Image (tube, rainbow, N blue to C red):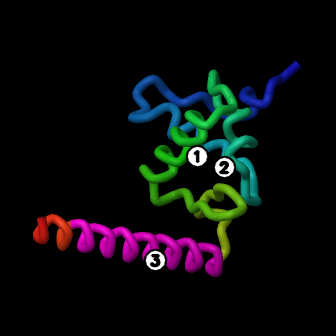
Amino acid sequence: MISQLDLFDRPTADSANPELEWFLQILKSSSTWMTATAIITRMPGWPICENSKRALRRLASKTPQVISGDLGYRHLDSATTAEVEHFAGRLRSQAHLMLERVEDVERQTQNV
């Protein structure tokens, strides 16, 4: 019987990041959003746990080919323009909030 992983080409030995390659192949095989749990179940050797979800977020942050949101993860090739715009807006908002926090911390440091 063929397992889910057999449906994908295995990354080559010279792949810069085999886990990232698996992640991208899994997303490319789906035309819809995928939850972290659904992706992790297809990642070789990954247990379903919070550490795996963190590792998945880290992988997603390493490539412009993946967008994420409340529905999970999606490959950029299958995302709509509206989904990409929503994702970009969300990232910009988070960046703005992070910069505000940095400035607040720096102001507090100057007052000490």
Q: Outermost residue, front direction?
A: 112
* Image-quadrant location for residue 7: top right
Main secondary structure type of the part rendered in magenta: helix
Disc 3 crowd rating (10 Å Cα; few below 14, some 14-19, many 20+) is: few
Residue 55 image position (x, y, % from top left): 52, 38
Q: Is residue 84 magenta?
A: yes
Residue denoted by label 2: 27
Q: Residue at x 66, y 26 (%)?
A: 47
Of the residues shown, which amino acid type is indicated by label 2? Leu
Q: Residue at x 40, y 74 (%)?
A: 97
Residue denoted by label 1: 24
Residue denoted by label 3: 93
Q: Residue at x 49, y 31 (%)?
A: 18
* Image-quadrant location for residue 94: bottom left
Of the residues shown, which amino acid type is indicated by label 3? Ser
Q: Secondary structure at mark 3?
A: helix
| Mark 3 in CB contact with mark 1 (< 8 angstroms) | no
| Mark 2 in CB contact with mark 3 (< 8 angstroms) | no
Q: Quadrant of the C terminus?
A: bottom left
Q: Which of pointers 3 and 1 lies earlier in the amino acid sequence?
A: 1
Disc 3 to disc 1, how far (Cα)?
26 Å
Q: Which region of the structure is painted magenta?
A: 81-105
Disc 2 to disc 1, how far (Cα)?
5 Å
Residue 80 image position (x, y, % from top left): 67, 74
Disc 1 crowd rating (10 Å Cα; few below 14, some 14-19, many 20+) is: some
Q: Which mark is residue 35?
A: none
Q: Residue at x 45, y 23 (%)?
A: 13
- Residue placed most toward the observer, 46 or 107: 107
| Mark 2 in CB contact with mark 1 (< 8 angstroms) | yes
Of the residues shown, which amino acid type is indicated by label 1? Leu
Residue 73 position (above or below residue 109): above
